[in-house]
């Protein structure tokens, strides 16, 4: 039985979100990201009738494929990876008619691509509105951007934009060079650097929680907040990504982009409006205010680790160095914990503890705002034994939602206080499946809304913060300490927090 066309948006809202007729060109159109994320997202946009009335999607890669083979392969991939199942064959058939593939193994390939794009424009009336999506290995970004410029792929009318996948550079310098190259073909307002975390509903909800409500913001500062904890915990190991991960490590893979973006959203000042300039101006101020980590006292602020053998969810797993494609003496970190400070009026002196790691006991991404304890203890110490500090926990994945933890009287004679949870659960409250982050972000890029994409100055500051730590670790005599898979990381990471009289939350 086919799925019905689901669109939770009212018709007016749907029309307001529907982009102009356009063409999407995906470099890396035969790759893993395209088949697991981009095409399922585009198909789901089609299912919700959120794609333009006329559009085409052209996959490009060095190995050529026929349009038919491309459509067949994506039919299987989208069937497997779409968030809505089973595939609606009727919607798929009409979607697939808009799919094409062009091989770009050499200069001639780019000319062929240009001719194909011009012909599609003429046939469909898409006015040369083009979204170029770079989903190739990073080494291909610069050559492809240059080829877009050299072969005049931007088209003579309409708009052109480029979406660039992570990683954006491998340090501050290479990110700057990449931006300079991109700017020879695209203006900054045409550049959409993707951090898919920002497309997640619950991440956007951080801004809604903070700035659409009157009750949180008065407490959101150093007067009331004791500290903030941000956790991105994975149970998986390096999987098939050893080639990339060996060069990147947790610092480049998660901290430089996702964790620092989450920090910026939690710590930023209220923007004047929810638009790309206002939101990104406020985020970048936070990144500028991040106190640089003192390389001479690194271990007071930054801890790394690498997983050894252990058990995750009851299953024995190998050590990182035993994984396929990983060097036997690898020094790549699979865990990072940081204590950061945002040196501004709102946050002076308040620690932001952040951690991320692979092969941890639980998959969980969350932000916990822990509040100060009440200034005066009215109840006896004995009565308050079961009371933890108040915390507001924003759960990003899984089980998206928000919990407020506070003390309540246990219903017995006399006063006994215990921490209870007031829970908001996304799924149960709205009864609709949240769109995948890539659906949101592709639609935004097609509409020219860059609010949820990372601007050049943000990327620059993010690298400026992590580069000195990465450099110090690269030259440190010792390798990262090993933590047992299935535990919460190296012991030093606990010390980072306990030294301040605090503890990591049980995420
Ligand atoms: N996979 C994920 O879940 C994921 C998540 C986040 C970010 N990313 C990022 O997305 C990018 C792609 O990752 P992936 O996992 O999809 O890689 P992949 O499976 O190795 O696919 C790479 C794709 O790029 C094509 N390609 C390589 N060089 C090219 C060139 N010079 N011109 C045109 N096409 C070229 C490849 O086809 P040919 O070899 O035929 O050219 C293939 O289609 C990477 O930057 C990665 O960091 C991936």
Image (cartoon, helix red, strand yellow):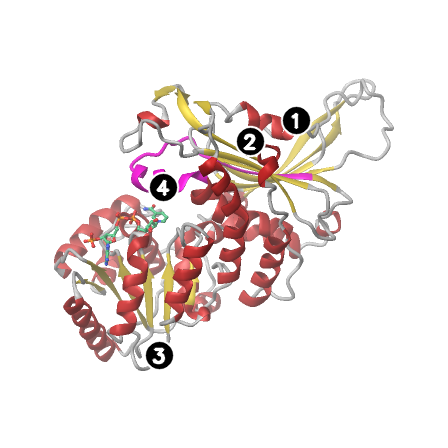
Vertical arrangement, residue 502 with respect to residue 404, above or below = above
Q: Residue at x 75, y 20 (%)?
A: 385
**How far is mark 3 from mark 2, CA to CA?**
48 Å
Residue 158 is marked as 3
Q: Image check: 446 left or right of 300?
A: left
Q: How many neighbours does mark 3 have within 10 angstroms: few (below 14), some (14-19), or many (20 or more)? A: few
Q: How many neighbours does mark 1 have within 10 angstroms: few (below 14), some (14-19), or many (20 or more)? A: few
Which circle, 1 or 2, is nearer the viewer?
Answer: 1
**How far is mark 3 from mark 4, CA to CA?**
39 Å
Is residue 500 in view from this perspective? yes
Q: Residue at x 28, y 62 (%)?
A: 143
Question: Earlier along the polypeptide chain: callout 3 or callout 4?
Answer: 3
Is residue 440 in view from this perspective? no
Question: Earlier along the polypeptide chain: callout 1 or callout 2?
Answer: 1
Give x and y (percent) for residue 499: 67, 27
Q: Image check: 407 left or right of 422?
A: right
């Amino acid at each position: 039985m086919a799925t019905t066309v689901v669109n939770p948006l009212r018709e007016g809202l749907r029309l307001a979100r529907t982009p102009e007729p356009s063409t999407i060109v995906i470099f890396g159109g035969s790759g893993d990201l395209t088949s697991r994320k981009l095409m399922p997202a585009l198909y789901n946009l089609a299912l919700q009738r959120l794609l333009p009335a006329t559009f085409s999607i052209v996959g490009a890669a060095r190995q050529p494929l026929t349009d038919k083979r491309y459509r067949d392969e994506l039919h299987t991939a989208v069937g497997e990876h779409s968030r809505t199942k089973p595939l609606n064959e009727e919607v798929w058939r009409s979607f697939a008619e808009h799919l094409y593939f062009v091989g770009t193994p050499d200069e001639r390939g780019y000319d062929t691509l240009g001719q194909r794009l011009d012909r599609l424009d003429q046939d469909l009336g898409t006015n040369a509105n083009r979204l170029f999506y770079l989903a190739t290995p990073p080494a291909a970004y610069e050559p492809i951007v240059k080829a877009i410029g050299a072969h005049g792929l931007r088209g003579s009318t309409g708009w052109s934009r480029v979406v660039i996948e992570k990683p954006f550079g491998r340090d501050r310098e290479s990110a700057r060079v990449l931006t300079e190259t991109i700017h020879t073909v695209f203006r900054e307002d045409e550049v959409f650097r993707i951090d898919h975390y920002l497309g997640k509903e619950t991440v956007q909800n951080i801004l809604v929680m903070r700035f659409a409500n009157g009750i949180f913001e008065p407490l959101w500062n150093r007067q009331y907040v004791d500290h903030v904890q941000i956790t991105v915990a994975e149970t998986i190991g390096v999987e098939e990504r050893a080639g990339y991960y060996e060069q990147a490590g947790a610092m480049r893979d998660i901290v430089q982009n996702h964790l620092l973006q989450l920090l910026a959203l939690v710590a930023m000042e209220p923007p004047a409006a929810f638009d790309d300039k206002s939101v990104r101006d406020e985020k970048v101020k936070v990144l500028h205010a991040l106190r640089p980590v003192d390389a001479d006292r690194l271990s007071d602020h930054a801890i790394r680790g690498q997983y050894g053998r252990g058990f995750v969810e009851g299953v024995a797993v190998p050590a990182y160095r035993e994984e396929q494609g990983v060097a036997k003496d690898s020094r790549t970190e699979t865990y990072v914990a940081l204590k950061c400070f945002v040196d501004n009026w709102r946050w002076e002196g308040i620690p932001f503890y952040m951690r991320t790691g692979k092969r941890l006991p639980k998959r969980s991404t969350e932000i916990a705002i822990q509040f100060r304890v009440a200034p005066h203890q009215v109840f006896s110490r004995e009565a308050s034994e079961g009371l933890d500090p108040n915390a507001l926990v924003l759960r990003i994945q899984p089980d998206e939602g928000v919990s407020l933890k506070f003390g309540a009287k246990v219903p017995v004679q006399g006063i006994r206080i215990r921490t209870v949870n007031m829970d908001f659960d996304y799924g149960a409250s709205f009864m609709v499946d949240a769109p995948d982050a890539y659906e949101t972000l592709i639609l935004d890029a097609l509409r020219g809304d860059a609010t949820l994409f990372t601007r050049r100055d943000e990327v620059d500051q993010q690298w400026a913060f992590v580069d000195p730590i990465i450099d110090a670790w690269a030259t440190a005599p010792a390798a990262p300490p090993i933590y047992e898979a299935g535990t919460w990381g190296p012991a030093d990471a606990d010390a980072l927090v306990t030294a301040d009289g605090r503890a990591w939350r049980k995420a």
